[in-house]
Image: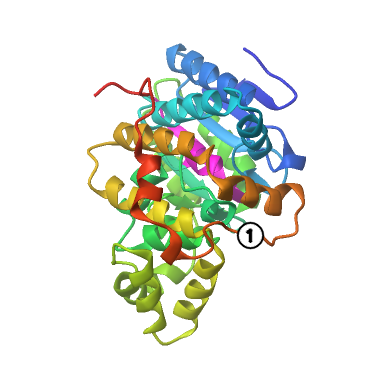
Amino acid sequence: MDSTDELLIERRGSAGIVRLNRPKALNSLTLPMVRIIASALDEFAADPAIASVIVMGEGERGFCAGGDIRLLHRSGKEGTDEAETFWREEFLLNHAISRYLKPYVVLMDGITMGGGVGLSAHGSHRVVTERTRLAMPETGIGYFPDVGATWLLPRAPGEAGTWMGLTGQTVGAADVIHAGFADHCVASSALPALIDVIAALPASASAADVHARIRTMAVDAGESRLAANRDVIDRAFSADTVEEIIKALADEPGEFAAEAASVIASRSPTSLKLALRLLRAGRKSANLAECLNRELGACKGILYSHDFYEGVRAAVIDKDRNPKWSPASLAEVTAADIDRFFVPAQPPLFAR
């Protein structure tokens, strides 16, 4: 089975193990990595000696910080098909993970953002640690929550997913579990032992067997900040326009609402309106595939958006953290501006 410098594939006992191996880049995904992961999952699924798959990141800082933003930026600037190819294959992988027939155990230790959420939150056995820092920060770079997040976020309790998608704020283990993006918290120091325990299961082990092993090593994740502020979140983020959400936040007392309002004010106005519309559409969608199809169309629209290039410039290239959004205000972003992101991609990822 293929292994490269960026990705390590191994078998240990009854477990197939996938290790993302770009620790200096926080294990950010490249197209070759996506392809090798997809191939490895197919081979493990067909191997009767493999009972489960474990996916993890090398290094102590992060599981996976997302996709290769520089590649997407360069592809859009140069007009190549690299960006669309990456999105298509990444989204197909996300969907395959959601339907994987064997236990898919993912260790979300450290930073888990963007594409890292796509690799993890669709899985069957999702483990966080005290070091987990999860976010969908895309509105801060002129983009939107993708990798099936428009299916996942609307299914978080109340409006927690709307808060996550619009603010892009980082959350810890308890909040990740509260939002439905993870199942168990295990101490980071116990992860090697957890891998050994899962790998020691017989080849006939079931999903319930894997769940039981993880549960025996699980610890209390602590208090969820999102759960503690659910009333505020639900009142403020239930509106269907960003302007109404901001007004509702201004009417809420306390630091939590003020912080959310301040963060949203720094995000791309176009991305905020696009993200909210996608989240509301995702809430009404029948399945993940429908959301991924819609997201792919929006991705293609992003390549013609000023804010994506400006956001990546400010965050990744020049790193001045001072993007100049255009349009610069929510009032200037029209419904027609957002409509252009809802042109279906051809061919679609999934037939209706």
Identify which amino acid the numbered label 1 is placed on: Lys
Q: Residues within 10 Å of mark 1 (few under 14, many from 20)?
A: few
For the C terminus, the image quarter is top left
Residue at the location (75% across, 47% down)? 317
Is residue 8 shown above or below 311? above
Frontmost residue, 227 versus 73: 73
Frontmost residue, 283 versus 131: 283
Quadrant in the picture for residue 314: bottom right
Question: Residue under circle 1?
Answer: 324
Frontmost residue, 165 versus 206: 165
Is residue 222 shown above or below 105? below
Instruction: Name the secondary structure under disc 1.
Output: loop
Residue 39, position in %: x, y? 53, 16
Residue at the location (42% across, 33% down)? 296
Residue 249, position in %: x, y? 40, 77
The question of residue 270 being in magenta is answered with no
Residue 89 seen by the camera: yes
Along the horizontal axis of the image, is 336 left or right of 62? left
For the N terminus, the image quarter is top right
Q: Which residues are magenta?
A: 102-120
